[in-house]
Image (tube, rainbow, N blue to C red):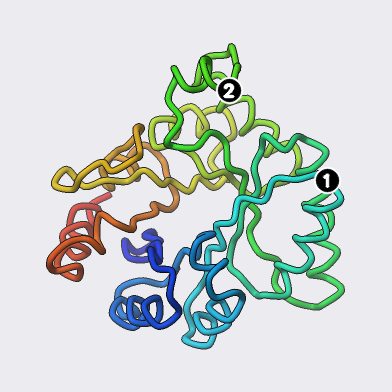
Amino acid sequence: MKSHNRIILALDAADFNDAIKIIKKFRNYIDIFKVGSELFTAVGPKIVEEINSMGKKVFLDLKYHDIPTTVAKTARVVSKLRVFMFNIHTLGGFQMMIETTEALVKSSLNENIQRPLLLGVTILTSIDRKALSDELGISQNLRTQVRHLAGLALKAGLDGVVASPEDIETIRSYCGRGFLIITPGIRPSWAPLDDQKRTMTPKDALMHGANYIVIGRAVLSQPDPIKALERIEEEIASV
């Protein structure tokens, strides 16, 4: 896979026109754009339709987390948007994950459309070991919890997980080579950390076994975003 195909650019915008400007600026460099909750809430499905019309792919990052029936029904709607991939929270439980997987397969077959990749969010990159135990009341250590959730996702038939770069090796060794790992929390050595606590450089993340890396502010906040992206591509070209 070429280096630019492994980068997912996060559309950190809450305005349709601003998002389109970003896409047009990077369309020759990026194949997959991430649409998060802020942008999707602000403008709705039309941003997905617009990205698809440009021949690009969408990672719909809405992290669905609800009772199994609700998430399964939502997955059927998402499949009709023709997104490339989307995610649900693994903390929603095994039943939620397996019902969503089954609903997605049935919907895609009934509509005769390509099934989106279904990913499970393990533990957010803003959560560290202290927050996991003191705030969420989960006694297992962070790595053990992530491995457990990734294993549940694999068992439920998900295509992969969204996980911190620090957890890549643990998940890869536990879930195998065919299991996708999409990694946020990516920060080049020259970019600020912002609110993410468990981060890694793009090259290191791919060397550890990530399939895709998600980058947003680390590029978009730079004085010359295209040059920043080119620096990252040069860094990971040898991986």
User: Along the horizontal axis of the image, is 39 left or right of 62?
Assistant: left
Quadrant (top left/top right/bottom left/bottom right) for the N terminus: bottom left
In the image, what residue occupies the spot 54% across and 75% down? 43
- The answer to which of 205 and 143 lies nearer the viewer is 143
Marks 2 and 1, the one that precedes in the sequence: 1
Can you give x and y, in whole percent of width and height, for residue 204 in the image? 28, 40
Q: In which quarter of the image is residue 233?
A: bottom left
Q: Which of the numbered marks, if any, corresponds to residue 68?
A: 1
- The answer to which of 27 and 91 lies nearer the viewer is 91
Q: What residue type is labelled 2?
A: Leu
Mark 2 nearby-residue class (10 Å; few <14, some 14–19, many ≥20): few
Can you give x and y, in whole percent of width and height, for residue 219 in the image? 24, 60
Give the Cα separation between the discs numbered 2 and 1: 22 Å
Mark 1 nearby-residue class (10 Å; few <14, some 14–19, many ≥20): some
In the image, what residue occupies the spot 59% across and 56% down? 62
Q: Is mark 1 on a helix, strand or loop?
A: helix
Q: Name the residue under label 2.
A: 136
Can you give x and y, in whole percent of width and height, for residue 164 in the image? 43, 37
